[in-house]
Image: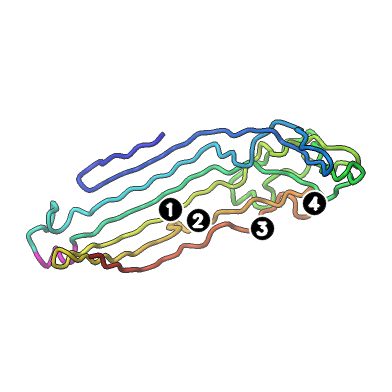
Amino acid sequence: MKGTRKLTAGLTLNATFTWSRAEGMNTVQNYDAPIVPQAWARLGSDQPDSFSMVFTYQLPFGKGQHFLSGNKIANALAGGWSIQSQSLIHSGTPLAVTQGTNSNTGCNGCSQLPTATGVSAQTSGSVDSRIYGWVNPAAFTVTPAYAFGNVSSRLNVYSPPLFNIDASLFKTVTIKEHYKFQFRAEALNLTNTVLFASPTLNVSSPSTFGIITSQTNFPRLLQLGGRITF
């Protein structure tokens, strides 16, 4: 769903929501043979929910606005200001479990996937509480030699979601009709939210399996700028 709407005399809102599911055939590459289909599974690009919103609001002060329009000093101080915000909320993508031990060298380099134990790979709790246990390690075991393993290429467990808000406050001043100066104060990652990377998912390394060790974004960033147009 997508929509753009001017709600009031200075507010413009653009919002998009996408619900989707991406699936495809998982394959195993044999060095001396064509690609061989192995299993139908979620694709790495599968992102079920995605929401984005951009709004711009021109503050109702100064020349041509509802308030302080007749006072030159008030217009110079309070007129021409606008607020803009961009928000992104995305669900994560399905994770892939691997194993570092590949004993299938006897079949011309066939790759191996881990083997499921029958225990659920899902864990519960908030994002912060699952940093050291995003995926249940008891759900998998290393596949022995000359076997493919039965774990799908993508799990029904998703990486941490994305949440980010950028905002800016800017003032535009018209100089002799043909010149405009714009001052901008911007905040990237306004809420200072940590976006965690995907966990390590190599069953051959049990000490780090399922643990998130890094983040994918930067802390709140503030910046000031100016621009002249003519």
- Find the distance from the CA under tag 4 to the CA under tag 2: 29 Å
Q: Is the magenta region chiefly helix, strand or loop? A: helix
Picture disc at residue 206:
4
Q: Earlier in the sequence, mark 1 or mark 4?
A: 1
Q: Are marks 3 and 1 in contact (CB under 8 Å)?
A: no
Determine crowd level at label 2: few under 14, some 14-19, many 20+ residues with C-alpha closer than 10 A: some
Q: Residues within 10 Å of mark 4 (few under 14, many from 20)?
A: some
Q: Amino acid at mark 3?
A: Thr
Region of the chain picked out in magenta, as a range: 72-78
State the CA–CA distance, disc 1 to disc 2.
9 Å
Residue 101 screen position, x and y as percent:
85, 49
Q: Which residue is mark 1?
A: 165
Q: Position of residue 104 (x, y in %)?
A: 88, 44
The CA distance from mark 3 to mark 4 is 14 Å
Query: Which is more N-terminal, label 4 or label 3?
Result: 4
Q: Which residue is mark 3?
A: 213
Q: Horizontal and vertical percent for residue 69?
A: 10, 57
Report the Cα–Cα distance between label 1 and label 4.
Answer: 36 Å
**Amino acid, disc 2:** Thr
SS under mark 3:
loop
Spatial separation of the CA atoms under disc 3 and disc 1:
23 Å
> Would you say residue 74 sits in the magenta stretch?
yes
Q: Residues within 10 Å of mark 1 (few under 14, many from 20)?
A: many
